[in-house]
Image (spheres, rainbow, N blue to C red):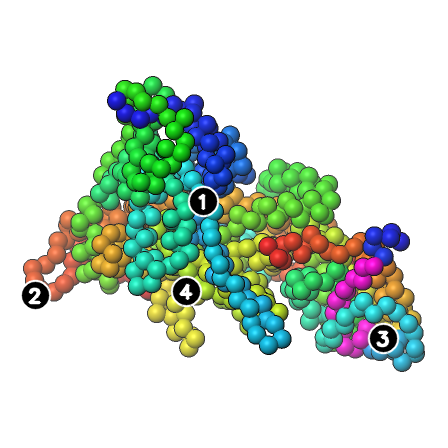
Amino acid sequence: MIEQLRQRARELLGEGKVALVIGHGRGSSPQATFPVFITKADAVDRLVFNPFCRNNLAVYLTRKDIMPKGAVGLVARPEEVRSVAVLVQEQQFDADRVVLIGVACAEPGKEGAACEMLKGRTLKELEAEVAERLKGRDPAQDVAARVKELEAMTPEQRLAFWEKEFSRCIRCYACRQACPMCYCERCIVEKNQPQWIPSSARPLGNYFWNVIRAFHLAGRCIGCGACARACPMGIPLDLLNAKVAREVKESFAYEAGFDHEVPPPMASFRTDDEQEFIK
Amino acid sequence: MAMLLARKNLHALLRGAMEKKYRVVGPTRTAGIVLFAELSDPGALCLDELNTQNSIKEFFFPKSETLLTYTLGKKDVAIADDFAPPRTVLIGGRACDARSLVALDRLFGWDYKDKFYFKRREATCVITLACDRFDEACFCTSLGFGPRATEGSDILLVPAEGDAYIVEAVTDKGRALIAELEDVFTEGTPGAEKVAYPEKKFDLAAVKPWLERNFDHPIWKEEFLSCLGCGTCTYQCPMCHCFDIVDEGDIHGGARCKNWDSCQFALFTLHTSGHNPRPAQASRWRQRLRHKFVYYADKFGTEACVGCGRCIRNCPVRLSILDKLVLIGREAAAAPAPPAGAQPRGVTKRWRATTSIFRI
Amino acid sequence: METTTAEFEPKIIAFLCNWCTYAGADLAGTSRLKYPANIRAIRLTCTGRIEPMFLLKAFQEGADAVLVSGCHPGDCHYTSGNYHARRRWTVFRKLLEFSGIDPRRVLFSWVSAAEGRKWSELVAEITAQVRALGPFTSFERIVKA
């Protein structure tokens, strides 16, 4: 499988179809892979893929300081396919700017799990293939269960829970930087006229930041978990994201990252959207 | 004969300190990770991990420090800036952590004595634990010290055979604490020390000269592309000390806060004009390395790095400062400094062949 | 009503659309309809203009509850601002609830320029509800920390 992956990267670079391939590179152990940036066909042997490749590489596609003018090849797991679908849907770049090299692992994070190439070549084909693969599978069951536990609490208890979790936040913004959807040139947390979100790592600012971050991902988060994995203080950000994603799904029958051709849910509406909460 | 602390007496030591009204700070497990935090009882101490996620700087230079509070009256403004940190025993830091304090003392006491930092320093007794293990991110020995160095500690505990620590009182403050809590210590013949030294991984002496003459080296364009630009490395670093001062409040009152800031943020050097002298993430990484190994060394005679490895373990994309230092060490060996007067460049063949598509 | 909260006068910050609810509230006034003075109205062009941060800022400044009110669906002065707002609040109120803010403190309504009576009754109803909930001390704890 890795040879197929390298062959595609070699072809794309060799034929000049892309100026850069972004993939996972070999680290000191299978668990320690890291993002690599390959510009020459003879360097594709640096690419690897295994169940421990968990970085969402789509985060680099909106990075102005490293994106070349031409097209880019991206080693794309279902998470990257869905992220690219959202980024194209939000018109951050044209679909043909990114050549997807589809890959997938049967059980991410599990030693020895089977990995394979995805068949689709275009974004549209890959969206359908990924949707098919994920059908009936809920990769984040433990997250959903923890969301339910929290929902069973009283608002007071939940506030106390988040107060405690957010108290560890050091405002390093690793959650934001690891997220492909956080591409704003100036994040709301850095807007200071007025200062919407206090910049001090104290309870209020930490609360505002983490809640607003989750809200700004409504209908956009594809649940890759990069934010929670990046958090050096172990804050369960995936719970907030999962909660928002579920509300979007239940209210608007929409899941992010399966169709780049429909309008984003938070930038569109139906006249018959539910409104039982409005008096 | 030496002073010993039986491993089983560790909790008694902490309980004694708590009874003497010390705040006790040590590694403790919270939500699955081990952090330095105030311990509610001695049992909360957790020494399972080699190193904590956060560094001890939090207890000398907190993530958000209130410098003063103000209240606006009808005619005048009332300002309160009294500061009296609690007497603290900080246990469970490593030799690298303790060394960071000595290096930070030079910075915070250089042209202006930072009263917040030094009052906390004076109020805190640092009990360091020499390491009986290391991992692949550790590199204290490459920086010219080691896991049982005493610099910065008030008391050093060295693990030894026989389930005990050999107690080394390093400072008067340490000796005073030992006298205060003498019941838990014993005199005895120490067993063999169990200290583990990571191997030396690069030549420190070569790093600074190489960095000084290679500001425009192709390395900067190629090796740091994956950096996401988060502040994790700098915020978990015991030595990184940049801060921002902000006023938070309204017409009635508020506080002036000293908050951590990071050179890895794009906004850190963004000018009002829109110009940014460090326009790419790679240029921010170059700054991080040069600050740690050139500027800080020039000004304070020591590197702003203690080899604790937190930035490596916590990096979301495993971008390792150690790997880069090893690479620089190799480059320096392959392309040594030119003789005086010659072109101050040292680019090896590998890098000369690079035609980078990346900007910096 | 409990005697312990009888003295408590809640502060409710109302973000109102210029074209419908603000005019409706005005009508309530010119019609001499009485309603509790616990509402602090902030006039905005459209419910679609109301940023989620506005609500959080209101809580930061000590609001015991917030109300967002605008034109009925189909009546937006800007055609669709209230439809967009409706989607936003559908998600945001659930997120706030999940983050520990009691949904009874985050209120929404459609009140047209002709509904002065609905406005006065609504304000009376939500004021009583928030008064019964008591002051939002748990959030104050976060603000003051």
How many angstroms separate mark 1 from mark 2 (CA)?
A: 56 Å
Q: Is residue A83 magenta?
A: no
Mark 4 burial class by Cα count in 10 Å: few <14, some 14-19, many 20+: some
**Mark 1 belongs to chain:** B
Question: Looking at the rendered structure, which numbered label has been put on residue B268?
Answer: 4
Residue B92 in sight in this render: no
Q: Find numbered disc 4 in the image and state the secondary structure of the residue it sits on.
A: helix
Q: Which residue is mark 2?
A: B341
- What residue do we see at 28% from left, 42% from top? B151
Say which residue appears at 24% left-offset and 52% top-offset. B302
The answer to whether dots 1 and 2 both sit on one chain is yes
Q: Which residue is mark 3?
A: C24
Residue mark closest to the camera, 4 vs 2: 4
The secondary element bearing badge 3 is classed as helix
Residue A148 placed where, x, y %? Answer: 69, 41
First in residue order: circle 1 vs circle 2: 1
Give the Cα separation between the discs numbered 4 and 2. 36 Å
Q: Which residues are magenta?
A: C7-22
Magenta span includes C14 = yes
Tag 3: amino acid: Gly
Instruction: Tell me the amino acid under the disc marked 1.
Output: Arg
